[in-house]
Image: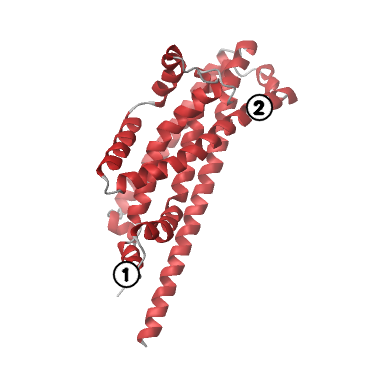
Amino acid sequence: MSTQPSQRILFDEPGPRGRRTIALATVAVALLIIALVIVVLAQLDAHDQLEPQKWFFFTQPGFATYMAYGIVGTFRATLVAAVFAFPFGLLLALGRLTRQPLVHAVCVGWVEFFRSIPMLLVVYAFLLALPSYGLNLDIYWKLVIPMILVNSATTAEVFRAGILAVEKGQSEAAQSLGMSARMTMALVVLPQALRLVLPNLLTQLVSLLKDSTLGYVVSYPELMERGRILTSYTHYLLQTYTIVAVIYVLLNFGLTRLAGYLQSRGNRKSAGHRGSRTELAATTMA
């Protein structure tokens, strides 16, 4: 009995007329995008934004060094925030899954609160509100602590989903061998959950990297702040932020590809484990 492709389960495969419609729509959209790009380039050229001297500045070695310090500042904020936010998120996820009412309520309140407010508001709280109460931190921590607070809440939901995705039979088998609930969680459930959520954690790292762009609010010298300072001296607003955007795209693209690689690798390992169990079961039955 032949199995139906998964794509056909999700939607009906288009017929000849449908395929022609999709092809025509694709060509029309592509032509529209090309026309839009041409119009934008023509407008930029009309306002002298494509002149070579306005772009030649960005090929100078000094510019590369200057922006490299901004990239270092971005990674410094991102990685330190991840080092604190990810373990904190794991503790919040475990707190949401606990049966202790007080711990559960506190963790739920924390997650729901920081998931519901924009990080910019938290940054402004550390920048403007808390100093009036005597808590005036260094500009680095005025950026990093809000990143930790907000992303710990979103990361907690990632960990909670990973824990709940582990088959209940794993926990039941461990407890049937005499393992306590804590030992089962620490030695059986968490290792499998961490492997499941690793690609999502890298995606969360991309989100942290983008959140670091709020460093300009507190004047922290990350990549976006470097670009802002540069435009105040060169007045090349479009050119500078185009280069900054390209750098962010390359950084995020690299992290996203790494997440995709780890996810595909994890899927292959899971498929291999399932295949091994199937072969073992077949051999046992034989």
Q: Is there any visible trace of residue 50 in the rendered image?
A: yes
When the figure is inspected, residue 263 is found, relative to residue 41, above or below; the finding is: below
Mark 2 secondary-structure assignment: helix
Q: Nearer the viewer, mark 1 or mark 2?
A: 1
Reading the image, the residue beneath label 1 is: 176
x then y, percent, for residue 169: 31, 65
x then y, percent, for residue 175: 33, 66
Reading the image, the residue beneath label 2 is: 69
Give the position of the N terminus as an image quadrant: bottom left
The answer to which image quadrant residue 79 occupies is top right
The answer to which image quadrant residue 171 occupies is bottom left
Give the position of the C terminus as an image quadrant: bottom left
Q: Please tell me which residue is depicted at 29% across the width and 34% down the height of the picture.
A: 109
Q: Earlier along the polypeptide chain: callout 1 or callout 2? A: 2
Separation (CA) of disc 1 from disc 2: 55 Å
When the figure is inspected, residue 33 is found, relative to residue 241, above or below; the finding is: below
Decide if residue 26 is on the left or right side of residue 212.
left
